[in-house]
Amino acid sequence: MKTTKAAKSTPVKPAAKKAAKKAAKKTTAASGKATGVAKKATATIKKAAAASKKAVPAKTAASKKAVPAKIVAKKAAPAKNVAKKAAPAQAAPKKAIVESHAALVRRARRINRELAEVYPYAHPELDFENPFQLVIATVLSAQTTDLRVNQTTPGLFAKYPTPEDLAAANPEEVEEILRPTGFFRAKTKSVIGLSKALAEDFGGEVPGRLEDLVKLPGVGRKTAFVVLGNAFGRPGITVDTHFGRLVRRWQWTDETDPDKVEAAVGALFPKSEWTMLSHHVIFHGRRICHARKPACGACPIAPLCPAYGEGETDPEKARKLLKYEKGGFPGQRLNPPQSYLDAGGIPAPPLGAG
Protein backbone atom coordinates (compact mmCIF):
# COMPACT_ATOMS: atom_id res chain seq x y z
CA MET A 1 0.00 0.00 0.00
CA LYS A 2 2.94 2.38 0.75
CA THR A 3 4.45 1.55 -2.56
CA THR A 4 1.32 2.43 -4.39
CA LYS A 5 1.03 5.87 -2.73
CA ALA A 6 4.59 6.68 -3.60
CA ALA A 7 4.05 5.72 -7.18
CA LYS A 8 0.99 7.83 -7.43
CA SER A 9 2.61 10.93 -5.93
CA THR A 10 5.78 10.78 -8.02
CA PRO A 11 4.32 11.86 -11.43
CA VAL A 12 2.74 14.97 -9.91
CA LYS A 13 6.05 16.77 -9.53
CA PRO A 14 7.06 16.80 -13.24
CA ALA A 15 3.67 18.17 -14.20
CA ALA A 16 4.01 20.96 -11.72
CA LYS A 17 7.48 21.70 -12.96
CA LYS A 18 6.22 21.84 -16.55
CA ALA A 19 3.40 24.15 -15.55
CA ALA A 20 5.83 26.28 -13.61
CA LYS A 21 8.21 26.39 -16.59
CA LYS A 22 5.38 27.35 -18.93
CA ALA A 23 4.27 30.02 -16.54
CA ALA A 24 7.84 31.26 -16.24
CA LYS A 25 8.21 31.35 -20.03
CA LYS A 26 5.01 33.29 -20.37
CA THR A 27 6.14 35.67 -17.67
CA THR A 28 9.53 36.07 -19.31
CA ALA A 29 7.91 36.68 -22.69
CA ALA A 30 5.59 39.25 -21.20
CA SER A 31 8.44 40.96 -19.41
CA GLY A 32 10.46 40.85 -22.62
CA LYS A 33 7.66 42.46 -24.50
CA ALA A 34 7.31 45.07 -21.77
CA THR A 35 11.03 45.67 -21.87
CA GLY A 36 10.87 46.08 -25.63
CA VAL A 37 8.03 48.53 -25.33
CA ALA A 38 9.95 50.35 -22.65
CA LYS A 39 13.03 50.44 -24.85
CA LYS A 40 11.00 51.72 -27.75
CA ALA A 41 9.44 54.36 -25.52
CA THR A 42 12.85 55.31 -24.19
CA ALA A 43 14.18 55.54 -27.73
CA THR A 44 11.23 57.71 -28.71
CA ILE A 45 11.82 59.97 -25.72
CA LYS A 46 15.51 60.19 -26.60
CA LYS A 47 14.65 61.08 -30.21
CA ALA A 48 12.18 63.73 -29.03
CA ALA A 49 14.78 65.10 -26.64
CA ALA A 50 17.36 65.17 -29.42
CA ALA A 51 14.89 66.91 -31.71
CA SER A 52 14.09 69.43 -29.04
CA LYS A 53 17.78 70.05 -28.45
CA LYS A 54 18.28 70.65 -32.13
CA ALA A 55 15.26 72.94 -32.25
CA VAL A 56 16.37 75.00 -29.24
CA PRO A 57 19.76 75.93 -30.68
CA ALA A 58 18.01 76.89 -33.90
CA LYS A 59 15.88 79.33 -31.97
CA THR A 60 18.87 80.42 -29.97
CA ALA A 61 20.87 80.91 -33.13
CA ALA A 62 18.04 82.84 -34.68
CA SER A 63 17.69 84.94 -31.56
CA LYS A 64 21.44 85.46 -31.45
CA LYS A 65 21.37 86.63 -35.01
CA ALA A 66 18.38 88.91 -34.30
CA VAL A 67 19.86 90.48 -31.17
CA PRO A 68 23.00 91.84 -32.81
CA ALA A 69 20.78 93.42 -35.47
CA LYS A 70 18.98 95.37 -32.77
CA ILE A 71 22.24 96.19 -31.09
CA VAL A 72 23.66 97.36 -34.39
CA ALA A 73 20.56 99.48 -34.94
CA LYS A 74 20.99 100.96 -31.48
CA LYS A 75 24.64 101.58 -32.15
CA ALA A 76 23.81 103.08 -35.50
CA ALA A 77 21.22 105.46 -34.02
CA PRO A 78 23.75 107.79 -32.37
CA ALA A 79 25.34 108.18 -35.79
CA LYS A 80 22.40 110.43 -36.67
CA ASN A 81 23.14 112.54 -33.64
CA VAL A 82 26.78 112.61 -34.61
CA ALA A 83 25.78 113.68 -38.10
CA LYS A 84 23.61 116.43 -36.66
CA LYS A 85 26.43 117.62 -34.46
CA ALA A 86 28.90 117.45 -37.28
CA ALA A 87 26.58 119.23 -39.77
CA PRO A 88 27.70 122.82 -39.04
CA ALA A 89 31.08 123.02 -40.71
CA GLN A 90 31.46 126.60 -39.54
CA ALA A 91 33.58 127.82 -36.68
CA ALA A 92 32.00 127.67 -33.24
CA PRO A 93 31.07 131.04 -31.70
CA LYS A 94 33.67 132.46 -29.38
CA LYS A 95 33.04 132.28 -25.66
CA ALA A 96 32.61 135.27 -23.44
CA ILE A 97 35.83 137.21 -23.13
CA VAL A 98 37.18 138.54 -19.87
CA GLU A 99 38.59 142.03 -20.09
CA SER A 100 38.99 145.04 -17.84
CA HIS A 101 36.78 148.08 -18.26
CA ALA A 102 39.70 149.95 -19.81
CA ALA A 103 40.21 147.13 -22.34
CA LEU A 104 36.49 147.13 -23.15
CA VAL A 105 36.56 150.89 -23.78
CA ARG A 106 39.55 150.53 -26.11
CA ARG A 107 37.95 147.67 -28.05
CA ALA A 108 34.56 149.44 -28.31
CA ARG A 109 36.10 152.65 -29.59
CA ARG A 110 38.25 150.78 -32.07
CA ILE A 111 35.15 149.05 -33.44
CA ASN A 112 33.47 152.43 -33.88
CA ARG A 113 36.54 153.79 -35.72
CA GLU A 114 36.56 150.76 -38.03
CA LEU A 115 32.86 151.16 -38.77
CA ALA A 116 33.34 154.88 -39.47
CA GLU A 117 35.78 153.93 -42.23
CA VAL A 118 33.36 151.36 -43.68
CA TYR A 119 30.31 153.66 -43.47
CA PRO A 120 31.57 157.24 -43.85
CA TYR A 121 28.15 158.13 -45.29
CA ALA A 122 26.12 156.69 -42.36
CA HIS A 123 22.95 158.70 -41.81
CA PRO A 124 19.37 158.38 -40.54
CA GLU A 125 17.55 156.23 -43.08
CA LEU A 126 14.28 158.11 -42.85
CA ASP A 127 13.53 160.81 -45.43
CA PHE A 128 12.79 164.20 -43.82
CA GLU A 129 13.14 167.90 -44.54
CA ASN A 130 12.40 169.34 -41.08
CA PRO A 131 12.00 168.25 -37.44
CA PHE A 132 8.23 167.76 -37.82
CA GLN A 133 8.67 165.32 -40.69
CA LEU A 134 11.39 163.46 -38.81
CA VAL A 135 9.38 162.98 -35.62
CA ILE A 136 6.33 161.79 -37.59
CA ALA A 137 8.43 159.42 -39.72
CA THR A 138 10.16 157.98 -36.64
CA VAL A 139 6.85 157.28 -34.92
CA LEU A 140 5.60 155.55 -38.09
CA SER A 141 8.75 153.38 -38.30
CA ALA A 142 7.66 151.19 -35.39
CA GLN A 143 7.05 147.55 -36.49
CA THR A 144 7.95 148.25 -40.11
CA THR A 145 10.93 149.19 -42.28
CA ASP A 146 12.29 152.67 -42.91
CA LEU A 147 11.80 151.95 -46.60
CA ARG A 148 8.05 151.44 -46.16
CA VAL A 149 7.83 154.65 -44.15
CA ASN A 150 9.78 156.58 -46.79
CA GLN A 151 7.43 155.29 -49.45
CA THR A 152 4.39 156.38 -47.40
CA THR A 153 5.29 159.79 -45.95
CA PRO A 154 5.46 161.72 -49.28
CA GLY A 155 1.68 161.34 -49.68
CA LEU A 156 1.09 162.18 -46.00
CA PHE A 157 3.20 165.36 -45.98
CA ALA A 158 1.86 166.50 -49.34
CA LYS A 159 -1.65 166.54 -47.86
CA TYR A 160 -0.74 167.60 -44.30
CA PRO A 161 2.49 169.65 -44.40
CA THR A 162 2.24 171.20 -40.90
CA PRO A 163 1.27 170.06 -37.39
CA GLU A 164 -1.88 172.18 -37.59
CA ASP A 165 -2.94 170.48 -40.82
CA LEU A 166 -2.43 166.99 -39.46
CA ALA A 167 -4.10 167.86 -36.15
CA ALA A 168 -7.30 168.81 -38.00
CA ALA A 169 -7.21 165.82 -40.38
CA ASN A 170 -10.00 163.26 -40.79
CA PRO A 171 -8.68 160.11 -39.06
CA GLU A 172 -10.18 157.80 -41.68
CA GLU A 173 -8.30 159.60 -44.46
CA VAL A 174 -5.05 159.45 -42.51
CA GLU A 175 -5.59 155.74 -41.82
CA GLU A 176 -5.92 155.05 -45.52
CA ILE A 177 -2.61 156.79 -46.22
CA LEU A 178 -0.80 154.99 -43.38
CA ARG A 179 -2.26 151.55 -44.09
CA PRO A 180 0.95 150.23 -45.80
CA THR A 181 2.98 150.81 -42.62
CA GLY A 182 0.91 148.40 -40.52
CA PHE A 183 -0.88 149.15 -37.21
CA PHE A 184 -2.27 152.11 -39.11
CA ARG A 185 -5.13 152.85 -36.69
CA ALA A 186 -2.84 153.14 -33.67
CA LYS A 187 -0.31 155.13 -35.70
CA THR A 188 -3.02 157.48 -36.96
CA LYS A 189 -4.08 158.15 -33.38
CA SER A 190 -0.45 158.84 -32.38
CA VAL A 191 0.46 161.22 -35.22
CA ILE A 192 -2.79 163.19 -34.94
CA GLY A 193 -2.40 163.40 -31.16
CA LEU A 194 1.25 164.36 -31.52
CA SER A 195 0.34 167.09 -34.03
CA LYS A 196 -2.36 168.47 -31.73
CA ALA A 197 0.15 168.63 -28.85
CA LEU A 198 2.67 170.46 -31.04
CA ALA A 199 0.02 172.93 -32.26
CA GLU A 200 -1.46 173.59 -28.82
CA ASP A 201 1.53 173.34 -26.48
CA PHE A 202 4.56 174.25 -28.57
CA GLY A 203 3.29 176.76 -31.11
CA GLY A 204 3.45 174.28 -33.97
CA GLU A 205 7.19 173.69 -33.44
CA VAL A 206 8.98 170.49 -32.44
CA PRO A 207 10.72 171.07 -29.08
CA GLY A 208 14.46 170.55 -28.86
CA ARG A 209 14.55 169.13 -25.32
CA LEU A 210 14.37 165.49 -24.32
CA GLU A 211 11.95 166.12 -21.45
CA ASP A 212 9.50 167.88 -23.79
CA LEU A 213 9.75 165.38 -26.62
CA VAL A 214 8.94 162.34 -24.47
CA LYS A 215 5.66 163.98 -23.42
CA LEU A 216 4.36 163.84 -26.99
CA PRO A 217 2.00 160.95 -27.89
CA GLY A 218 3.92 158.03 -29.38
CA VAL A 219 7.36 159.52 -28.61
CA GLY A 220 9.76 157.59 -26.38
CA ARG A 221 13.44 158.03 -25.67
CA LYS A 222 14.50 156.28 -28.87
CA THR A 223 12.39 158.58 -31.06
CA ALA A 224 13.46 161.60 -29.01
CA PHE A 225 17.16 160.86 -29.52
CA VAL A 226 16.65 160.36 -33.26
CA VAL A 227 15.07 163.81 -33.47
CA LEU A 228 17.57 165.50 -31.14
CA GLY A 229 20.61 164.03 -32.85
CA ASN A 230 19.54 164.46 -36.48
CA ALA A 231 17.29 167.52 -36.44
CA PHE A 232 18.93 169.56 -33.67
CA GLY A 233 22.51 168.26 -33.61
CA ARG A 234 22.27 167.24 -29.97
CA PRO A 235 24.03 163.94 -29.15
CA GLY A 236 21.94 160.90 -28.35
CA ILE A 237 22.11 157.11 -28.57
CA THR A 238 19.35 155.41 -30.55
CA VAL A 239 18.73 151.94 -29.15
CA ASP A 240 16.70 150.12 -31.78
CA THR A 241 16.63 146.34 -32.39
CA HIS A 242 19.82 146.44 -34.50
CA PHE A 243 21.75 148.50 -31.97
CA GLY A 244 20.73 146.31 -29.03
CA ARG A 245 21.56 143.08 -30.87
CA LEU A 246 25.04 144.19 -31.95
CA VAL A 247 26.23 145.69 -28.68
CA ARG A 248 25.29 142.44 -26.93
CA ARG A 249 27.12 140.39 -29.58
CA TRP A 250 30.16 142.59 -29.07
CA GLN A 251 29.80 142.17 -25.29
CA TRP A 252 29.67 145.88 -24.65
CA THR A 253 26.77 145.08 -22.32
CA ASP A 254 24.45 142.20 -21.52
CA GLU A 255 21.50 144.46 -20.73
CA THR A 256 18.27 144.08 -22.70
CA ASP A 257 16.29 147.07 -21.43
CA PRO A 258 16.82 149.94 -23.93
CA ASP A 259 17.38 152.55 -21.21
CA LYS A 260 20.02 150.39 -19.52
CA VAL A 261 21.68 149.63 -22.86
CA GLU A 262 21.80 153.35 -23.59
CA ALA A 263 23.43 154.08 -20.24
CA ALA A 264 25.96 151.23 -20.48
CA VAL A 265 27.08 152.04 -24.02
CA GLY A 266 27.03 155.79 -23.43
CA ALA A 267 29.60 155.30 -20.66
CA LEU A 268 32.08 153.84 -23.18
CA PHE A 269 32.15 156.83 -25.55
CA PRO A 270 32.43 160.60 -25.42
CA LYS A 271 29.01 162.23 -25.66
CA SER A 272 30.00 163.95 -28.90
CA GLU A 273 30.21 160.55 -30.64
CA TRP A 274 26.83 159.19 -29.58
CA THR A 275 24.78 160.17 -32.66
CA MET A 276 27.24 158.91 -35.28
CA LEU A 277 27.95 155.81 -33.19
CA SER A 278 24.25 154.98 -33.44
CA HIS A 279 24.32 155.38 -37.23
CA HIS A 280 27.45 153.24 -37.60
CA VAL A 281 26.07 150.40 -35.50
CA ILE A 282 22.61 150.45 -37.11
CA PHE A 283 24.10 150.58 -40.62
CA HIS A 284 26.29 147.58 -39.80
CA GLY A 285 23.37 145.65 -38.34
CA ARG A 286 21.27 146.18 -41.45
CA ARG A 287 23.98 145.43 -43.98
CA ILE A 288 26.30 142.79 -42.53
CA CYS A 289 25.58 141.70 -38.94
CA HIS A 290 22.04 140.44 -39.52
CA ALA A 291 19.88 138.87 -36.84
CA ARG A 292 19.57 135.39 -38.38
CA LYS A 293 22.43 135.07 -40.84
CA PRO A 294 25.28 137.43 -39.99
CA ALA A 295 27.86 137.62 -42.77
CA CYS A 296 30.85 136.94 -40.51
CA GLY A 297 33.13 136.11 -43.46
CA ALA A 298 32.60 139.60 -44.92
CA CYS A 299 32.74 141.53 -41.64
CA PRO A 300 35.43 144.24 -41.35
CA ILE A 301 35.53 143.98 -37.54
CA ALA A 302 35.65 140.17 -37.30
CA PRO A 303 38.96 140.16 -35.34
CA LEU A 304 37.35 142.36 -32.67
CA CYS A 305 34.07 140.43 -32.41
CA PRO A 306 33.54 137.81 -29.67
CA ALA A 307 30.56 136.43 -31.63
CA TYR A 308 32.52 135.67 -34.80
CA GLY A 309 31.34 132.31 -36.12
CA GLU A 310 27.65 132.71 -35.29
CA GLY A 311 27.06 133.34 -38.99
CA GLU A 312 28.54 132.35 -42.35
CA THR A 313 32.35 132.45 -42.18
CA ASP A 314 33.11 131.48 -45.78
CA PRO A 315 33.96 134.77 -47.56
CA GLU A 316 32.25 133.85 -50.84
CA LYS A 317 29.04 132.72 -49.15
CA ALA A 318 29.11 135.64 -46.72
CA ARG A 319 29.29 138.20 -49.53
CA LYS A 320 26.02 136.85 -50.90
CA LEU A 321 24.32 137.81 -47.62
CA LEU A 322 25.22 141.52 -47.84
CA LYS A 323 22.33 143.96 -48.16
CA TYR A 324 21.73 147.45 -49.54
CA GLU A 325 24.69 149.20 -51.12
CA LYS A 326 27.11 146.56 -49.77
CA GLY A 327 25.25 143.96 -51.79
CA GLY A 328 24.61 146.26 -54.74
CA PHE A 329 20.94 146.77 -53.88
CA PRO A 330 18.86 149.94 -53.37
CA GLY A 331 18.91 151.55 -49.96
CA GLN A 332 15.94 152.59 -47.82
CA ARG A 333 15.76 156.30 -48.64
CA LEU A 334 14.07 157.74 -51.71
CA ASN A 335 16.13 160.89 -51.22
CA PRO A 336 19.42 159.86 -49.58
CA PRO A 337 22.30 162.27 -48.83
CA GLN A 338 24.73 163.00 -51.66
CA SER A 339 27.56 161.34 -49.76
CA TYR A 340 25.62 158.08 -49.86
CA LEU A 341 25.09 158.38 -53.61
CA ASP A 342 28.76 159.23 -54.13
CA ALA A 343 29.69 156.03 -52.28
CA GLY A 344 27.65 153.92 -54.68
CA GLY A 345 24.34 153.87 -52.81
CA ILE A 346 21.19 153.48 -54.87
CA PRO A 347 17.95 155.35 -53.97
CA ALA A 348 14.94 153.25 -53.04
CA PRO A 349 11.98 153.19 -55.45
CA PRO A 350 8.74 155.03 -54.54
CA LEU A 351 5.68 153.14 -53.35
CA GLY A 352 4.07 151.14 -56.13
CA ALA A 353 7.06 151.35 -58.47
CA GLY A 354 7.64 148.22 -60.50
Image (tube, rainbow, N blue to C red):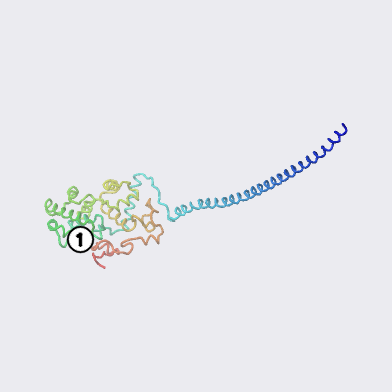
Horizontal arrangement in the rendering, residue 177 relative to residue 268 (left or right) = left
Question: Closest to the observer: 227 or 46?
Answer: 46
Q: Amino acid at mark 1?
A: Thr
**Quadrant in the picture for the N terminus:** top right
User: Which residue corresponds to the image point at 88% horizontal and 33% vertical from the top-left?
Assistant: 3
Q: Are there few (<14), some (14-19), or many (20+) residues within 10 Å of tag 1? A: many
Give residue 289's position: percent from left, percent from top. Answer: 34, 56
User: Which residue corresponds to the image point at 84% horizontal and 36% vertical from the top-left?
Assistant: 8
Q: Residue furthest top?
A: 2
Element under disc 1: helix
Q: Residue furthest front?
A: 1
Question: Closest to the observer: 49 or 237?
Answer: 49
Q: Residue furthest bottom?
A: 354
Q: Which residue is mark 1?
A: 153
Quadrant for residue 166, please give it. bottom left
Quadrant for residue 329, please give it. bottom left
**Quadrant in the picture for the C terminus:** bottom left
Q: How many marks?
A: 1
Give residue 74's position: percent from left, percent from top. Answer: 50, 51
Give residue 32's position: percent from left, percent from top. Answer: 73, 45
Give residue 312's position: percent from left, percent from top. Answer: 39, 57
**Relative to 307, is 1 above or below?**
above
